[in-house]
Every structure is written in structure tokens, then in C-alpha cells.
Image: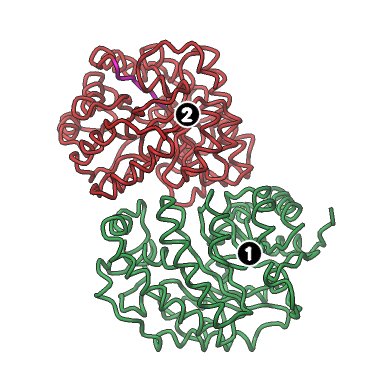
Chain colours: A green, B red
């Protein structure tokens, strides 16, 4: 594994991402700063709208730190949103009850080149989080991968069948490639800005990677991710990159081999035996408890957590969910999860 | 392959499903009878609501035959709906613009044991289709697989995160198993009724197989499917069964090996090389053109069709889509597809 040599950090997350097997695997949860926490809902109400919350450094830093104070995860993930990139490209963005709304684009020429000043408050939020974080806790920055960001930009929000964006990609692949490259370029600068401000790890969320055909996956998921990884590695060779091609299924392995990510986040459907045998020999893996189990709690959750740790804990492993935490999750279940994960893993 | 010996039918679909490689692979399209056809929309308007259309034998038979008359597919698939089973179990069912609506169930004891008389019109529709079908065209019956039917019954319709149904399955696996078994039992009788009336092949649609964890997939997808396949094979040993665990990804192979299906339908994301190397040595495969490509047409469609035929046509193969045809699809694109598929496949 590329990152194994020269490990000097003692933060557990960074050790695992560098390829080390830990007796007590580090953990964090996707969307750990969010609606399931009453203290989050309070700040959210104060901020008014969601974009304001993301772009007010004091508030974004505060909600980033909330779950760490309560549960002591091994990593904080910056409170932000993947759709700040389309906004920086000039697209109007709002959040309604049923999710994000954008004015759909059908031509990349209608977009700007990316107003980085608009993203500057995110850097300030990173700096504030850094001063408030315990020594052993790592800070993760993130962005949407270009394909997933493009789906929102073209569909105008979440989608059921990805009709518009896929039609564009098939009908006019060169025009669509221009859109992808524009997103890619702002994403590269956005992640660079986060790293320069202090994040130690970045994650690329490709939430809709699973809806493409294999040829589409190669062109719109793997290729842009590889270019981003290459560019970021050239600038920041020691910052690990976690890829999350959700729903990639049979293409997970190809994604890992071809993109050059340091770690891969697994969705709920990925079997542990596959992840252990085929992926963990290449990179660190992260995941993949079903978020519904965190909501349900009980012995069902404990058993599933123990099974995951038993199978994936024998290699470089970061415990996480297979998808974001659900807003209905009782915080006590997260506390219980923290207790389970604090127990040392028995060596096999 | 189990079905290879004793092939006497000359219908191309049955030959392919029995394991034969054909120079010109047979084809049909999921949802081939449907809204993209003006003649369908006419009958639909006459029927009034969707359930009436399914349960009026004359009309259901008519729309089943429409695509065969226009395009000459190698198979007709009975016009019906997977939610007739919950209806036979006593659940109220209606179709609104945004999809099916049911009164959510939370206890299988609230359901009946299955009113088979309610499904009798489907048998009559099958008999009518049989008399109108060309000699070389096979007739496919179908049902939803128990897991997928359960998702609609518990969620009350389509769902985004399958929160309710998965919560039930985790919290009360025995109670949920009782629901699955009740669905399974009616499904077995429903498919038997279709076969006795004349369908020659059945397909089990497990459209939401991909949202489960590997353990859930084993218990709620594979196990009920295996029991259904076993029961149907005991009664109708010569009727091939096609399984469609949409989104199964890394679990496609396990599904094929463990359920005993004769053929497997592949969703859009399944790579041909995997399907050829790992699945086609076990069963016939069916699929998996992206339905968006049929909507887009052009050379992009032709190239993708030719690639699929070149890779999967070297084994037992049924051409199909990876998901249902989209209502916005121009019928001329289906006609063009029929022309492409009529060209003989060059042997490699």
C-alpha cells in the first residue's frame, strides 16, 4: 500500500487510511453532524436556511464539532454540502423540504468558471474547527464527485430515473464532458482550499455512481475521479483520499484499481467477504453498517457491528455506515455504538 | 445446464432459456406493453383505471399483443401488475400519477390468506393471448418476488429509503418472515394459475433487491426465491424461471447459484464480461441495454446493442433492457432496434 511507509501521525483515522490494521478500528458516521441531533436542529433554526448554515463559519464549525463532543468519533467531517460547487458555478440553489432545488442546466456554457470567493467561508470554517478539535481527532473535508454533482445540476434536484442527465450524456458526450470538466476543475480547487485550511483527509461522494451502465461508469465516474486524485496527489501527496462510489457493485474493484484512491467507502450492499478479499489488499476500506440498524438499535445492531469488525477489522479498516445517518436515529443508539466500538477487537 | 436436454420447442426464447446459443438471440423488452405506445394509451383511456385494465381479460390480452404486432418480439409478457398479489391479500390498491398507493400494513395478521378468485381474470387473459400469438412467440407470465412486493405493502407505495420495511425486518424478523411467507404462498398460486392457463415462462421481478444488506439479501431475496423456484419446479418441471434481482451487484452470482433459476435478468449496471464469465456458464442471461439508450436512439444505441450481442451472444442469451422501457421512448426506436436484432450475429 502506497501510504504504509512513513506513517508518523498518531491519529487513528490517518493510521488506518495509511494501511495500518488497528485493534480498535477508528470510526465516524456519514452525516454525523445533522438532524438527528437536537443541538444541530437548534443551530439550524438559528441559521434560517441551509446554505446560510454552510457558509457561516462560526455555525458550520459549531455543528461539525457537536457529534465529536457527544460521541468522540475519531474524525469530524466538515459540515458543508456537495451543491456549493454548482452554486459557485453560478447556479441558483435552495433547499426545500423534499431536498435541494436548482435551476436545471442544459449547456455548460451558461455556467461561470467558478467563483472561489463564494467558497472562502468554508476555509474559515475549517480553520475554526481545527482549533476546537481534540488532538486525536482527524478532520475530513469533502466534495461531490463530478458525476453526482452533474446529476443534481442537470436534473435540478434529486431524481428517480436520471432521465435528463443520462440522455444528455448519451446524446452529446462531448458537451457533457465539458460540464463534467467544469465541475471537476472547481472541485479540485474547492478541495485544495479545504486542505490548505487544515483538513487532513478528503472524501469524494459519488452517491449516484450506481445508476450508470459500465461504459458510463468508466467515463463519468472513474475517469474524472482518477483525474481529480492525480491532481490532488500532485499538490498534496500526503493527504489521503477516500472514494465513495455508492452502488458501484461489480465495479467497486475496478474503481479502486483505476482511480488511485487511498481508501474506499462501501455502501450497505457490499459483502464483507468480497471487501476483505478483493479490496482490502489494495486499499483501506470504510463502512458499511446499514443506517436502518443504527435507527433500530438493539442486539441486531450489536451483532451486525461485531460481524463487520470481525471480518473487516483484520485489515486496514474505518468503521462507518453504508449511507448517511437517518434523521430519525435516536442519539442514544449512536452512544451505544460508540461503546461497542470502544471495546478492543479480539485478534483472530 | 439443467434444461439443455430434451429441448423440443422451436420457439427461440425457450431454446435460449434451455441453454442454447442462437445466431440471432431472441428478444423482448420489459414493459413492452405500455405507455410509449399510442395504441396502449387508447386502451388505457377506455379502461379508465389501471387495475381495471389488468383485470379485464379482453383489454389485458389486447395490450399484451400490441407490441408483438408492431415489432415481432420473440416473447409477449402478460400485461399485469405485481401489486395484484397484495390486492388478493386484501390490501386496497390504487394507481395515481406518481405511482401505486396502498394502505401500509404493519402486521401480516391483518391480511387475508389470498383471494385467488380475484386473480382468475388474469388466467382468462392468458388464454386469450395464447389464441392470438404467432407460433414462434413465447408467452411470459410474471410476479413480483416476495421482498419487492413486501416493500410496496409496507411502505404503501414506492419508497426512497425503505425505512419502514427495513425497520420491520430488523426489529421483528419473525413477524416479517410471516409476511414474506404469506406473499410467497399467493405468488406461488398466482404463477401456477398463469402457467396452467398457458404461460410458458415466468419471471420473478425483485426490483428492490439492491437495497438490502448482504444478510438481508440472503434472507429476504434468496431464500424466498429459492423456495418459490423449488415449489414451481416440482409442479411444472419444464417451465423456465427467469429471476431479476435488480441491483444485486456483487450478489448476482450467489443469487444464481442458490436460487435455482434457469435464467437471470441483468440490470443496466452489470458488466458484460462478468456476466459472460461468471453467470453464463451457469444459466442463460437476459439484458441489459440502458433504457435511456432506447429513448435516445441514434448510433449510440446501435453500438451498445452490438457490443452486448458480441459479448453475451456467445452463450445462451436473451436480449432485453436493464430496466423497463421509458414512457417517453419513441416507438420508431423500438422498430430500429428490431431491425438491428434481426441481423444475424457474426460468430466469433
Q: Is label 2 in a helix, a strand or a loop?
A: strand
The percent coordinates of residue A167 (x first, y second) are 29, 55
Q: Could you say which quadrant of the image residue A221 lies in?
A: bottom left
The residue positioned 49% from the left and 84% from the top of the image is A122
Q: Which residues are magenta?
A: B136-142
**Residue B284 image label:** 2
Q: Is there any visible trace of residue A343 in the rendered image?
A: yes
Q: Secondary structure at mark 1?
A: helix
Which of B273/A330 is in front? B273
Where is residue A347, by image quadrant? bottom right
The CA span between labels 2 and 1 is: 48 Å
Q: Chain of mark 1?
A: A
- Locate residue A175, reporting x and y percent: 28, 66
Residue occupied by mark 1: A331
The dominant secondary structure in magenta is strand
Q: Is residue A303 magenta?
A: no
> Horizontal placement of B197 versus B252: left or right?
left
Residue A317 located left or right of residue A176: right
CA neighbours of label 1 inside 10 A, class few (<14), some (14 to 19), many (20+): some
Farthest front residue? B348
Question: Does the magenta segment cover residue B139?
Answer: yes
Front residue of B285/A249: it is B285
Expressed as whole percent of the image width and height from the top left, the position of residue B208 reads: 47, 42
Amino acid at each position: 500500500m502506497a501510504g504504509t511507509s512513513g506513517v508518523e501521525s498518531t491519529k487513528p483515522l490517518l493510521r488506518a487510511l495509511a494501511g495500518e490494521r488497528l485493534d480498535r478500528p477508528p470510526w465516524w458516521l456519514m452525516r454525523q453532524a445533522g438532524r438527528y441531533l437536537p443541538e444541530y436542529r437548534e443551530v439550524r433554526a438559528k441559521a434560517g436556511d441551509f446554505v446560510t448554515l454552510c457558509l457561516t463559519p462560526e455555525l458550520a464549525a459549531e455543528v461539525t464539532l457537536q457529534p465529536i463532543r457527544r460521541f468522540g468519533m475519531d474524525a469530524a467531517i466538515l459540515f458543508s454540502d456537495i451543491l456549493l460547487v454548482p452554486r459557485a458555478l453560478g447556479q441558483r440553489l435552495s433547499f426545500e423540504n423534499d431536498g435541494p432545488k436548482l435551476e436545471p442546466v442544459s449547456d455548460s456554457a451558461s455556467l461561470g468558471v467558478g467563483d472561489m470567493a463564494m467558497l472562502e467561508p468554508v476555509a474559515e470554517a475549517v480553520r475554526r474547527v481545527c482549533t476546537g478539535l481534540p488532538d486525536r481527532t482527524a478532520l475530513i473535508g469533502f466534495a461531490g464527485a463530478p458525476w453526482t454533482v452533474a446529476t443534481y445540476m442537470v436534473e435540478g434536484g434529486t431524481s428517480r430515473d436520471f432521465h435528463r442527465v443520462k440522455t444528455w450524456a448519451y446524446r452529446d458526450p462531448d458537451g457533457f464532458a465539458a460540464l463534467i470538466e467544469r465541475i471537476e476543475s472547481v472541485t479540485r480547487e474547492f478541495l485544495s482550499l479545504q486542505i490548505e485550511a487544515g483538513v487532513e483527509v478528503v472524501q469524494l461522494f459519488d452517491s449516484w455512481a450506481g445508476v450508470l451502465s459500465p461504459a458510463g461508469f468508466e467515463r463519468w465516474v472513474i475517469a474524472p475521479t482518477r483525474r481529480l486524485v492525480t491532481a490532488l496527489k500532485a499538490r498534496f501527496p500526503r493527504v489521503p483520499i477516500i472514494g465513495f462510489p455508492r452502488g458501484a457493485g461489480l465495479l467497486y474493484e475496478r474503481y479502486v484499481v483505476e482511480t488511485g484512491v487511498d481508501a474506499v467507502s462501501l455502501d450497505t450492499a457490499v459483502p464483507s467477504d468480497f471487501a476483505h478479499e478483493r479490496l482490502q489488499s489494495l486499499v483501506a476500506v470504510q463502512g458499511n453498517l446499514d443506517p436502518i440498524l443504527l435507527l433500530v438499535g438493539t442486539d441486531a445492531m450489536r451483532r451486525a457491528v461485531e460481524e463487520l469488525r470481525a471480518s473487516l477489522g483484520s485489515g486496514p479498516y474505518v468503521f462507518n455506515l453504508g449511507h448517511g445517518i437517518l434523521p430519525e436515529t435516536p442519539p442514544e443508539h449512536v452512544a451505544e455504538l460508540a461503546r461497542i466500538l470502544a471495546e478492543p477487537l479480539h485478534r483472530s
